[in-house]
Image: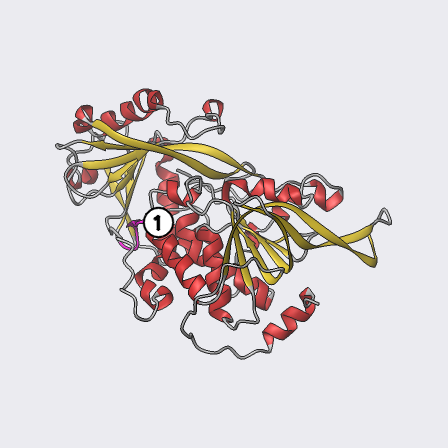
Amino acid sequence: MKRDWKMLKHVLSNRQYSDFKELWERPQVIPSTCDVLIIGGGAIGSSIAYWLKQKIYREEFNVVVVEKDPTYTKASTTLSVGGLRQQFSLEENIHMSLYGAEFLRNINEHLSIPGEPPIDVNFHPYGYLVLATEAGAETLVQNSKLQNSLGAKNVVLTKEKLKYMFPWINTDGIAVGCLGLEKEGWFDPWSLLCALKKKASYLGAQYVNAEVKAFQYKELLGNYDENMKCFKKLNNVVIKTNDGETRTIKFAVAIIAAGAFSGDVAELADIGTGENLLSVPLPVVPRKRYVYCFHCPDGPGLNTPLTIDPSGTYFRRDGLGGNFIAGKSPEPNEEPSIENLDVDHEFFDNKVWPSLAHRVPAFENLKVKSSWAGYYEYNTFDENGIIGQHPYHLNVFLATGFSGHGIQKAPAVGRAISELIFQNRFLTIDLSKLSFDRFLTSEPMREANVF
């Protein structure tokens, strides 16, 4: 019999952990039981798997990651432009991104594998440049003060300073800008995902290519709710493999880290469709976003930050030779259909290009070379991450809803979830305010800097 949740925590809290050992080849067999089941093998899920196995990588501690899309064609990670910034308005987000910056700086201390080449996520330390109109200037200034007080390093630039430092900018309508000086820029999200997944696998986490179809329960006899209904505990998941085979995996703990599809997975556990605590849904849905790659030989040069216009349009360099990528989130009433991943080129022509050309006149002569679309894990409640234990399903943890910022927060989120599982509390960064409980009390955690 698999250990129950309380016994598992007791055993883990008293166990001594050995050093890393060589990864051996094992047959790809779907296990019937595991200690921790992670639903979603993107950057967040793989980070959780890494941190769990980094604590205990012995064979008897079983971590299984279920990922339905092993090519990650629909994953939020692959859509990401790889931004790393501390220019947020909430302390929790600032701390997580600062932690992410340090993790990337020391990535080989965390994720290197003996005998393999060093990891390079191709970090470009050119910062973020967030521009604000007169109406948004005071908020930007106050946010900058908070960010610097917590360890970030950025500076607020006047309109004149902006023009001096970045002569390619049209400062019409701009009052101030905030430029990140350290620990900001962009990196290759695919490289980070691969490094996390590879190290988690090296430490013994098992990845299963399958889709979660249902959960199974056991009744907790003697435990009743106010309506005298017996409490139920999730203890099995039903999966369907890519070969069409249906299997069941028993678990002690489950973690929902399924990105844009986390809300759908939660519904399978009656979250949002049940009564009382189960009547509140996990408010994470997919939103389709476009990224456009264009060429402009006369565009801004090497020392160009990832720039965010007050219109919401962003751009950054993509290598050298006048190549750039850009995008923008649509207005709520313009959200595109999520039925496919077709790119809307009219959206670029009508919404993105005009903003680009207005802010950077050289972009009048750009030429789009390619584009792609992907799904964004959108938290409809407050556009902020959801991290922690579910209030009814106490053996279910949530790590989702980051609304475009998950890749840079993945290292911190993975560590946070591992702390909750092993120590029952946050140790590195207090993320209590980002728990599911805020949906029960209708207390949103609004982030001013959602781009």
Residue 251 visible in the snapshot? yes
Which residue occupies the foreground of this view, 200 or 354? 200
Locate residue 367 relative to residue 332 in the image: left or right. Answer: left
Which residue occupies the foreground of this view, 203 or 428? 203
Residue extent of the magenta highlight: 182-190
Q: Mark 1: which amino acid?
A: Trp
> Percent from the top left, x then y, of residue 323?
20, 37
Residue at numbered disc 1: 190
Which residue is the extreme one toward the left? 298
Residue 159 visible in the snapshot? no
Q: Residue at horizontal 59%, vertical 73%?
A: 12
Callout 1 secondary element: helix
Q: Quadrant of residue 425?
A: bottom right
> Percent from the top left, x then y, of residue 446?
51, 41
Locate residue 239 relative to residue 326 in the image: left or right. Answer: right
> Percent from the top left, x then y, of residue 226?
84, 49
Locate residue 394 relative to residue 230 in the image: left or right. Answer: left
Locate residue 434 relative to residue 150 in the image: left or right. Answer: right
Q: Residue at horizontal 84%, vertical 49%?
A: 229
Work out which quarter of the rendered image holds the C terminus and state it: top left
